[in-house]
Image (cartoon, grey):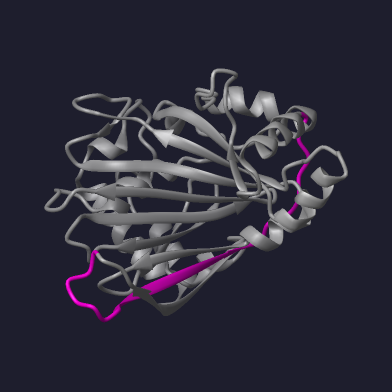
C-alpha cells in the first residue's frame, strides 16, 4: 500500500473517528482512540506525501561539544555528543507597517547595549512588551501570523525579539549616525498552562510550550535564520508528519529519550514565515508531547 492508497483508505473510515467533532471541545485534554489513530497515521505518512509543499526540510547528524572549567570533577576536558536535527526553512522577506517604530526601538537598544544581535522589544519602563493576543500583534505589525481560534485561547503572551543579522554592518551604520533597522523578528507565542482548565494545557503534565515565528524583513535574516538546529543527548529524533484539516503539512519531531522529560516539535512555513512549535512534558507523564501537540495544531488554517 502506497501513500495514495493510504489516503483513500483513510477516507473510508467512519466519520466519528476522523471528522472534527461538531461540538466545541479541547483535544489536548483527552487521551483516547482518536489520539492513538492520529499517532498511527503520522508514523505511516512520515517522509511521504506530507513532504510536498511543507516548506521545510530536515537533516540529521551528530555534534560534539567540549566542556572545560572548574565545574568538572576532572582536569581533562569532557566531550558531550548530541544527535542533531537541522530544520531548513524556505523563508521569504515580508514587509511590516511597524518599520519606523522598530527602527527607533532597535537604534535605542543598540546604543544602550551594543552589538549583541538579539534585542527584546520592551516597554518604556524596561519590561518586556506583551501584545497579549495574536490578533493584537497582527494588527500592530500588519502581518498575518496564524489563524486558529482554538489555539488562540491557549496563548497567554506574544513577545517580540528584534534580530540584527549583520552586526558589522549595523555598527558601521551607527558610526555614521544612521538609524539601525532589524533584519527580522522572532515572535514567540507563549502557551498557557494551568490545572483543570479548558483554556490551558495541563500544568501537571506540560512543563512548557510555545511557538516561535521567524519573520524575515531582509535577505540577511533569511540567510542567518533559515536553518535551526535541535539537539537530543541520548538518542536520534523520531520523525513523523501531520496534515491539518485545512491541508497544511507539518513536520513533526520528538525527543523522548531524556530522563528530564520528553519534547515534541512541529515545523512548517506559511507565506514566507517559518514556524517552530515545541511542547515539553514531565517524566512519567500519561501522554507524549506529540499526542498533545498534533491535535492542537491540526486546526490551524
Q: At x 19% / y 41%, what residue is drawn?
A: 205
Front one among 190 and 25: 190
Question: Residue 78: image x %, image y %?
Answer: 28, 77
Horizontally, residue 177 falls left or right of residue 11, namely right
Q: Residue at x 21, y 55 (%)?
A: 261
- The quarter of the picture where residue 40 lies is bottom left
Residue 45, percent from left and from top:
42, 68
Magenta span includes 84: yes
| Residue range highlighted in magenta | 71-97
Q: Determine if residue 34 is in view.
A: yes
**Above or below, 22 relative to 62:** above
**Residue 136 located within the stretch drawn in magenta:** no
Image quarter (top left, top right, bottom left or bottom right) of the N terminus: bottom left
Is 165 placed left or right of 205 in the picture? right
72 horizontally vs 300: left or right: left
- Determine the residue positioned at 69% across, 51% down: 272
Amino acid at each position: 500500500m502506497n501513500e495514495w492508497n493510504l489516503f483513500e483508505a483513510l477516507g473510508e473510515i467512519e466519520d466519528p473517528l476522523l471528522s472534527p467533532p461538531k461540538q466545541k471541545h479541547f483535544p489536548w485534554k483527552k487521551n483516547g482512540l482518536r489520539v492513538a489513530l492520529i499517532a498511527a497515521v503520522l508514523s505511516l505518512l512520515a517522509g511521504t506525501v506530507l513532504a510536498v509543499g511543507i516548506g521545510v526540510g530536515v537533516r540529521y547528524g551528530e555534534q560534539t561539544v567540549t566542556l572545560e572549567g572548574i565545574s568538572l570533577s576532572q582536569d581533562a576536558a569532557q566531550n558531550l555528543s548530541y544527535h542533531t536535527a537541522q530544520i531548513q526553512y524556505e523563508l521569504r522577506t515580508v514587509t511590516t507597517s511597524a518599520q519606523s517604530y522598530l527602527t527607533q526601538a532597535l537604534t535605542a537598544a543598540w546604543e544602550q547595549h551594543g552589538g549583541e544581535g538579539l534585542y527584546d522589544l520592551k516597554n518604556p519602563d524596561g519590561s518586556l512588551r506583551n501584545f497579549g493576543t495574536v490578533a493584537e500583534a497582527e494588527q500592530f505589525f500588519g502581518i498575518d501570523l496564524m489563524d486558529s481560534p482554538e489555539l488562540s485561547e491557549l496563548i497567554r503572551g506574544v513577545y517580540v525579539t528584534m534580530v540584527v543579522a549583520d552586526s558589522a554592518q549595523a555598527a558601521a551604520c551607527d558610526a555614521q549616525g544612521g538609524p539601525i533597522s532589524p533584519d527580522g523578528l522572532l515572535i514567540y507565542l507563549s502557551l498557557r498552562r494551568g490545572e483543570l482548565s479548558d483554556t490551558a494545557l495541563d500544568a501537571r503534565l506540560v512543563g512548557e510550550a510555545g511557538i516561535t515565528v521567524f519573520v524575515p524583513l531582509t535577505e540577511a535574516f533569511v540567510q542567518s535564520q533559515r536553518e535551526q538546529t535541535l539537539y537530543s543527548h541520548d538518542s536520534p529524533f523520531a520523525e513523523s508528519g501531520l496534515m491539518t484539516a485545512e491541508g497544511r503539512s507539518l513536520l513533526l519531531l520528538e525527543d523522548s529519550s531524556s530522563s528530564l522529560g520528553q519534547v515534541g516539535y512541529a515545523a512548517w512555513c506559511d507565506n514566507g514565515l517559518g514556524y517552530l512549535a515545541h511542547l515539553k512534558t514531565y517524566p512519567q507523564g500519561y501522554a507524549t508531547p506529540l499526542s498533545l501537540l498534533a491535535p492542537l495544531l491540526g486546526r490551524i488554517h
